[in-house]
Image: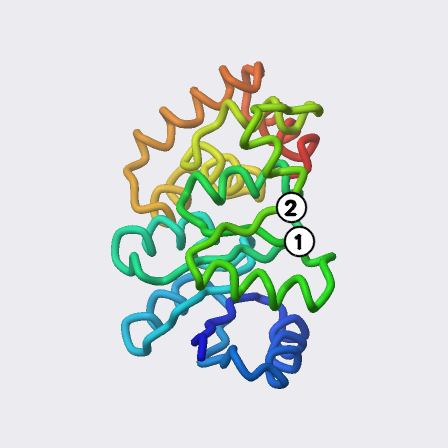
Amino acid sequence: MIKLLIADPHPIIRKGLEHLFSASSDIKIVGSVDNGEAVLEFLKKEPVDVLLSEIDLPKLNGLTVLRHLKADFPDVKALMFSAQPENVYGFNSIKAGAAGYISKNENVITVNEAVTKVHNGGIHLSNELTQELAFGTRNNKQGRFFKKLSTRETEVLKLLAIGKKNKEVSKELNINEKTVSTYKARLMKKLKVDNLVDLVNQAKFLDL
């Protein structure tokens, strides 16, 4: 029986997933949480095989959670489950250590199969993203820009785009403010802007 932890800020999504997996003979939901910090607290107390997580989590976002998993809970497989654009976040999720990325637009059978696949050591991605990772093909502006960004840069950009100040970013990512400023300067250079307003606008343009 696969022990599954669900992390999503929306109660209706969590309830829907609980209903979906209640009929499964192979997957058992052992917990359901609504923020990134709660994921880590749960993992300290209970055994989990697979984490099915939204990227946009309060307190600690999904990419930051992946960083903690890699360091502190390496046996837990993470499957990111999000409405965010796959060509942006699927790529960076895999770089951050996720075993897969699945869109919230997928059907219930695919979600079930994806959980089983990552538990068995596989990687679940759409055919399109698999080809992009295999052959380096990027056919749109979003992909071209975000391929230039490291996972940490994407985390910083995401937080800046929702209005977080340097101090708040440093606290959430557990880095000092000077490092945040360094990342901000790198982001401006890579995204070809020269001020914070344009940087945030670029993030929104890229559907961050």
In percent of width and height, residue 9 lies at 57, 66
Residue at the (49%, 35%) spot, across then down: 154
Image quadrant holding the N terminus, namely bottom left
Earlier-in-chain disc, 2 versus 1:
1
- For disc 2, the neighbor class at 10 Å (few under 14, some 14 to 19, many from 20) is some
Give the total of numbered labels.
Answer: 2
Residue at the (64%, 27%) spot, across then down: 202
In this rendered view, identify the residue nearer to me: 188 or 102: 102
Image quadrant holding the C terminus, namely top right
- For disc 1, the neighbor class at 10 Å (few under 14, some 14 to 19, many from 20) is some
Residue at the (29%, 77%) spot, across then down: 45
In percent of width and height, residue 30 lies at 45, 81
Which residue is denoted by mark 2 in the rendering? 126
Which residue is denoted by mark 1 in the rendering? 103
SS of the residue at dot 1?
Answer: strand
Q: Give the foreground label among 2 and 1.
A: 2
* Cα gap from disc 2 to disc 1, whole angstroms: 9 Å
In percent of width and height, residue 119 lies at 44, 63
Q: Which kind of residue does numbered mark 2 sit on? A: Ser
Q: Is residue 164 above or below residue 150?
A: below
Residue at the (50%, 42%) spot, across then down: 159
Q: Which kind of residue does numbered mark 1 sit on? A: Ser
Q: Is residue 142 above or below residue 52?
A: above
Cβ atoms at labels 2 and 1 below 8 Å apart: yes
Q: Is residue 132 left or right of residue 109?
A: left
